[in-house]
Image (cartoon, helix red, strand yellow):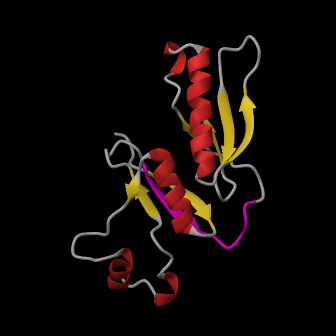
């Protein structure tokens, strides 16, 4: 049996980071459980204290139900080291496409995500290697790649 899981991304400010990843991945904000107008009302009902509420929308889901739920968890410390886990966003169509097509698709997605607040770290490409990718950081500095 496979295990169900969610991906948790530590952050300082969940809703803006969640908005970035909604746009990057084509996800949507997770609606509150049935019978609740918002997540804060739900968490109050299960006993979460007021000082832990009001952080904004912090969970996103794949509308098709294929990808994992992603929760943006507030942590007090700032990011200081490279992630030990990162997302790869695949837009190139893989080796079924010529390298020039893959390069164009990756570069276009990198520009789109830069406009949303990401930053390009470097392009991953070598002469003679049939691979092209872009290493990037989200608005809070978390690494991810586009290939």
- In the current view of this chain or complex, which residue is farthest to the top? 128
Residue depicted at x 51% and y 53%: 21
Residue 54 shown left or right of residue 102 in the figure: left
Quadrant of the snapshot with the C terminus:
top right
**Residue 98 image point, x, y percent:** 56, 13
Residue 147 appearing in the image:
no
Residue 69 shown left or right of residue 87 in the figure: left
Magenta stretch in the rendered image: 68-79
**Residue 49 image point, x, y percent:** 46, 87
**Residue 69 image point, x, y percent:** 42, 53
Tally of numbered discs = 0
Q: Nearer the viewer, residue 79 or 93?
A: 93
Residue depicted at x 33% and y 78%: 42
Residue 88 is covered by the magenta coloring: no
Residue 142 appearing in the image:
yes
**Residue 85 image point, x, y percent:** 63, 45
Residue depicted at x 47% and y 82%: 53
């Amino acid at each position: 049996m496979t295990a169900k899981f969610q991906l948790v991304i530590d952050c300082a400010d969940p809703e803006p980071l969640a908005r970035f990843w909604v746009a990057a991945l084509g996800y949507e904000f997770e609606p509150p459980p049935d019978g609740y107008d918002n997540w804060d009302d739900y968490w109050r009902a299960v006993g979460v204290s007021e000082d832990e509420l009001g952080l904004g929308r912090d969970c996103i889901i794949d509308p098709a139900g294929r990808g994992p739920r992603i929760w943006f968890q507030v942590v007090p410390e700032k990011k200081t080291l490279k992630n030990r886990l990162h997302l790869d966003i695949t837009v190139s169509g893989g080796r079924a496409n010529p390298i020039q097509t893959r390069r164009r698709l990756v570069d276009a997605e990198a520009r789109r995500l830069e406009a949303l607040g990401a930053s390009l770290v470097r392009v991953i490409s070598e002469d003679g290697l049939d691979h092209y990718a872009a290493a990037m950081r989200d608005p809070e500095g978390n690494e991810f790649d586009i290939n």
